[in-house]
Image: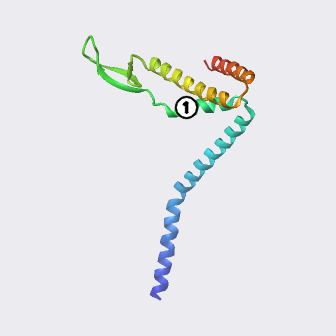
Amino acid sequence: MITNLIEVALVLLAGLAAYAAHRPVLAALRRFEQRNAERKAQEFRNAMDRYSHYRQTVQFVEEQIEPVTQVTVDDERTGQPVARYLFLGTLYGTRKDAEEVRYALVIERAREFYTDLDRIFLSPRRRRAAAALMDRLNRDSH
């Protein structure tokens, strides 16, 4: 009799615990499904876009280069604390200036990647065509 009562109590407690945890679990599963659907849609768009590999290369290189960070330093003239932006050990007055330098470095590294690929896999004639394509892509991205 007591063992049956303990078993019923354990089953009820397990049911209450499952009910209490079901909303966060379902929310996590919905977020996972949404990210998965977005990833599949992006893969489909990439398959239809002949320039997607260039954008993916730029994104990959961008992930490997340190971000611009904001630092507070004393102004050289007034001694007051001011915000400056640090990128690769150099201070810039505005975030825009630092981000422009960073973006130029990202593009340079992505070009180096494709230059190496071209040198390895393409004939000289196809290398010239690929270089023209990269120039056009860079003009379109600005």
Instruction: Give 119 or 58, whichever is nearer the viewer.
Output: 119
**Residue 2 spot, x, y in % from top left:** 45, 86
**Residue 103 spot, x, y in % from top left:** 52, 23
* Residue 77, above or below 71: above
* Residue 43, above or below 14: above
Identified by mark 1, the residue type is: Val
Instruction: Give 21 or 128, whichever is nearer the viewer.
Output: 128
Residue at (72% x, 22% y) in the render: 124
Left or right: 80 with respect to 104? left
Residue at (68% x, 31% y) in the render: 52
* Residue 39, above or below 60: below
Residue beneath label 1, please?
Answer: 61
Mark 1: few/some/many CA within 10 Å (<14, 14-19, 20+): some
Which residue reaches farthest bottom?
1
**Residue 28 spot, x, y in % from top left:** 55, 52
Residue at (52% x, 34% y) in the render: 63
Instruction: Give 10 or 92, whichever is nearer the viewer.
Output: 92
**Residue 35 spot, x, y in % from top left:** 61, 44
The image quadrant that residue 74 belongs to is: top left
Left or right: 141 with respect to 90? right
* Residue 26, above or below 19: above
Q: Quadrant of the C terminus?
A: top right
